[in-house]
Amino acid sequence: MSWVVWPGEWQARRVLGGKARALAELMEAGFEVPAWFVVPPQAFYASLSDDVEEELARASREGAAEPVELTFRVVGEAAADLGEALARLCPDGAPVAVRSSAAEEDGSEHSFAGQFESHLDVPSDAGEVRLAVAKVWASAYGERVRAYRAERGLDPVPRAPAVMVQRMLNPTTAGVAFSADPVTGRRGVAVVSAVRGTAAAMVAGIADADTWRIDREGRVLEQEKASRAGGGKACLTDEAASAVATLARAAERHYGRPQDIEWAHADGRLWLLQSRPITAIAGMFDPDGERVIWDNSNIAESYGGVTTAMTFSFARRAYEAVYREFCRLLRVPEEVIAANDATFARMLGFIRNRLYYNLPNWYRVLALLPGFESNRAFMEQMMGVRDALPADLLETLRPRVASGSAARWRDRRRFIGMVRALVREHRRLPSSVRSFHDRMERALAPPGVSIDRMRPDELAAHYRALERDLLNHWDAPLVNDFLTMIFCGVLRRVVANWCGGTPSGLANDLLATQGNLLSAEPVDRLHALAAIARKDPALLDGLGRLPEARLRPAIRANAAFSEAYDAYLHRFGERCMEELKLESLTLADAPGPLLAGIGELARASEEATQRTRVPRADKALRLAREVIGWHPVRRWIFGWVLRNARTGLRTREALRFERTRVFGRVRAIVIELGRRLHAARVLGDPREVFHLELGELLGFVEGNSTSADLRALAAVRQREFERNGREPAPDQRFETHGMVLHGHRYRVRRDSSAPGHGSGVRTGIGCSSGVVRGRVRVVKDPRTAGLEPGEILVAERTDPGWVLLFPIAAGLIVERGSLLSHASILARELGLPAVVGLQGAMGWLETGVEVELDGASGQVTRIAP
């Protein structure tokens, strides 16, 4: 056999090593590469003497704990073949470069840059080249390579590298180039460094280089001379530097990843000497990529913590359909809606199994409406966004907003049209809400064939009908939410401008809806159940302490309790913790939290859990009217705005309950399909269905799924779901650039010197007035809370499932949330002093700490441990 391999001998490609293999591929692709051949690793082993071979075997057995100090030589047939190859490569006696080409070298994960010896300008004398080859072999067993392998967790036993012998050039200039900036990670900026002559001194760090940064169009963004103080010319023209950048980018296109190349100008041509991946930026994001700010301030109330693929895919479909309908209702032209298909489809993000708002896209949707600037503040309030979109990012939306006199007039006409549409929708809102409820009752009426008896195709058809009849016609909730947002915002402005000198929190007190809020109905029912349980010692003793199955006889033995309990589950059985997650167990499925809540409430005194509701709202109304006085126009405007704000909030909560019912029906369909797929051995467990996307599940039934191996898909997603559940959650707000799901930590920079850091006083959003002082109870899971009467409940977020704790709590502190979140509305209705949006509350407070909470100002003062 031959002990030399030439580039065209592809049958021997596996012995070329990383560097030589890359150059062979580039030569085949048409790149200019100086001629070369390779001495493969087999030549090394054929040249070993018995004593050296024995020493290497010993080092291999002992794991190469110490560097191997041995002398190697090229002998026998390998030496003869090497001499013949040299004569063929350099018939004119030109010098050569002798460099390593190890199997692991220049890879996508490990470059081994500078670890092996390289020898340049080696005379093409066979003896000189044999000596250089032996030195390269020896460097593979030296301390430097051994340390490199240990640092990266590689196999400690080295392997002999292939050695590349390449014809040397006599360059006028040479250097290195990166197809992407290795420092900043900018993929659109190439970096070219050049020196006169060969690049050896520059690579060794001995000589400084001239450097260019060049954009994708070949324009020089920055040029830095080796000696900033010197007035000499750079060693390359800008055009020549741009040509080198083009070469680097061509290598990148060939390999499909950013490349670090060595190049040289010689004989009037641009040569490529080496190309390898830029491993340093493999895990970096591109700062020039699309900038997106992600925020889950408000959506975390509905989708807190990790969420399954099924829930996200359903929520994404629902948001897209609902907000298209919203724009149509406000008379946005169909062609404008169609032009923004991608915007509607990207309103939500799924980051480490958590739902986030894509804020720029929410603003883009709002920018489709006339009067963007005035609507923006209302939207931020509704969404609970603490910080507005940065000005520079907001500017990217300006082209969608009217500019110029003609465009401004068009925007004004559209704004007038939108106002007319809103006025019309406001007038017909009561009938629209009634129609919506009627449509809901028809769509959610018990089907002719019960869900548990439907065929899979009937279940899929039932979902399609729900999507068609409800999700694509969500008109009344959309209009009511938008009008409520406006009326609540106007009310705050009216109170601020016309009721100066009144206590803070007056606007919040006015928003209590006079005792007829649907979300407060569960609290009333809980009090009624607790009152019955107090009179039944056997039942009271078991509530929250015995499993539901063991407690069932005592429940059925008390007719009044049993009837009220069944009525609660029939009415609010779907309104559980994390009710909008399809994977959540409802109270109907697992009533333990409900029974525990009733038990805790029943064991507390009635006086400790009763609060005054309506009188506080009446007192606020009297105070506001007194301050406004008898000014007739102001009194009428104030009364009209207040009535509409209260009605809107009351309607909003009722319509959100209808949303809960829709999600409950979709949950039932998905669960039943999971059971059918499990029975058909498509899934290993029925609940694996939640790790599929909705489209995949329906597509499997309907025949348009791109994969039939649902079990494998579910397994991959389940592992990711569980892993993300164990790891720290991304921040509440962060930004990404370019590829969202790669290269980001999803964190913002923390400033420990910021005002209030470590302070005893912090301020959130006061949403329900009242001052209360007491110990806090930090609760992560309301099902295991153990809240005592008089304690202040502290939570990262709440949803309707937390209502079981509200009657017992003396106050409420929530890290997330807004003035229009469920917790805020319900706290006002119950007369429960509350602060939401208190950033960092879960880390600042711990159970047992005493605080004073001011629900009007939003201030929380830490008193003592």
Image: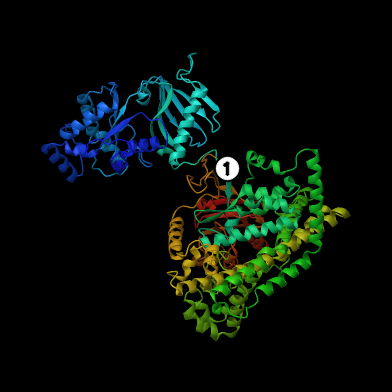
* Amino acid, disc 1: Arg
Residue 715 horizontal/vertical position (percent): 43, 62
Quick one: 654 or 172, which is closer to the camera? 172
Residue at the spot 61% in from the left edge and 58% down from the top edge: 772
Q: Can the viewer see residue 636?
A: yes
Q: Residue at x 78, y 41 (%)?
A: 407
On screen, residue 166 versus residue 126, left or right, reads right
Q: Which residue is label 1 attached to?
A: 291
Looking at the rendered image, the quarter that the N terminus falls into is: top left
Residue 583 vertical position relative to residue 733 in the rendered view, above or below: below
Residue 836 in view: no
The answer to which image quadrant residue 255 occupies is top left
The crowd level at tag 1 (other Cα within 10 Å; few <14, some 14-19, many 20+) is some
What residue appears at the point 17 percent right and 40 percent down from the top-left corner? 56
Query: What percent of the width, then of the height, locates residue 141?
Result: 22, 36
Tell me the SS state at disc 1.
strand
